[in-house]
Amino acid sequence: MVEVQNGEALQAHTLVVGGGISGITAGIELAEVGRDIILIERNPYLGGRVAQMNLYFPKLCPPSCGMEINFRRIKNNDRFKFFTLATVDKISGEPGNFEVQIKIQPRYVNSKCTACGDCEKDCAIEVENEFDYGISKRKAIYLPHDMSFPHLYVVDPKYVNDEAMKACVDACEYDAIELDMKPINITVKVKSIIWATGWQPYDAAKIENLGFGRVANVITNVMMERLASSDGPTQGRIVRPSDGEGIKSVAFVQCAGSRDENHLPYCSGICCLASMKQATYVREIYPDAEIHIFYIDVRSPGRLEDFYVKVDEDEKIHFHRGKVAEITEVPGGRVKLVAEDTMAGDINTIEVDMAVLATGMVPNTAVDKPPVEVEMDENGFLIAREAQTVIGAGTVVRPVDVASCVQDATGAAMKALQTIIDG
């Protein structure tokens, strides 16, 4: 991360918008073949959704492995410059000659920060932690997560003017907290732009029949990932949100809002495998737990079919072909699911300790369109065209897993490199 002055103008070969796995991959690939790149990310850290995961396919390893290697590659390459808390305001020009206006929001913490945590200890303001999808609380001055890169604290802008923040300033012996920081506007001239702003989980509260937000022990698949993470709100213990108790049974509800004209008409591709992966989390912690997976059809493409076969052989994991129609709460905080068994033609009613909704992936471009003429489909995904103004990478193009994002981002880097050569 570099420091710049308000109004400064920079030049690079490529601007990468989005600091998740797709954006990082594209940026590193270009920087390591000798091209100057600038990457911007709206969050106060790099890593995107991958940083919030417990394990990911195909190796089922923690994100700390791959991300740590990528962060080292960034630090060791002078051609890779990045800004966090940054967004694009305006894009003008054309491929080969873009001018981009970028706004960088203040962190309110400077580079003197050692991440010692003294300010956080003295902070009296607690708010919902978005990194844990609201399962936990954080302070108004906080380190986003253990592997945050850059490893600096940040102040929640909503509380900058709160009197209670003075205690945090006084607690910092390094004079690292500056509550009077202002936004910075810079101009970047580049030849190509890669758009890799990632995705967000579909809002489960919109699926009224499945009880999210009303039934305490109904959570989403991304929340489950945080519960299973050693750096998560429960240090890796998968427990019921209502009382913190362990679970003896859990239901995974596939296509929660997906393949549904009232919500997301498309399949997100990875949800079936994500739920099966999370079923293995439960089995490791609770060997006697009964697991029920309700599905329309199981989608496990390519070599990942072997993973499905392995999970299906587990006698404690039961697959039910049928879509869940209703979820309600019963005495004791248990969860009741009603679903049609399309194989037998019956209606099934099952009670479990917790239900996990496999919500789909919504491209961030659906809610935050690039400020430039760009072709998108009806669901907000960028359409890959040779003549596109910006080059899409990762989940803004289609729903894909982490490994596919890396492959796609490498392809986007090649396209950007071709633009550079042609330009």
Image: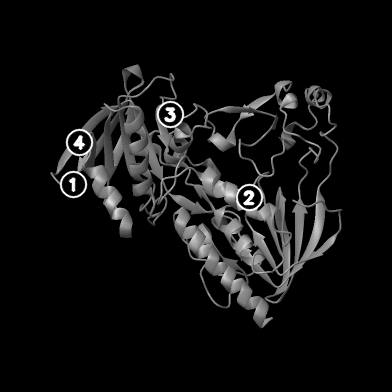
Which of the 4 image quadrants contains residue 332? top left
Outermost residue to the left: 344
Q: Nearer the viewer, mark 1 or mark 2?
A: 2
Which numbered marker is on residue 214? 3
Residue 288 picture quarter: top left
For label 3, the crowd category at 10 Å Cα-Cα, with few meaning under 14, some 14 to 19 and many 20 or more, is few
Residue hosting label 1: 342
* Mark before the other along the chain sequence, 4 or 3: 3
Question: Considering only order in the chain, which callout, 4 or 2, is on the residue closer to the N terminus?
Answer: 2
Secondary structure at badge 2 equals: helix
Tell me the mark number nearer the camera, choosing from 3 and 2: 2
User: Which comes before the other along the chain, label 3 or label 2?
Assistant: 2
**Distance between the alpha carbons at the discs numbered 1 and 2:** 48 Å
Q: Residue at x 24, y 49 (%)?
A: 309
Q: Which residue is mark 4?
A: 315
Q: Nearer the viewer, residue 138 or 38?
A: 38
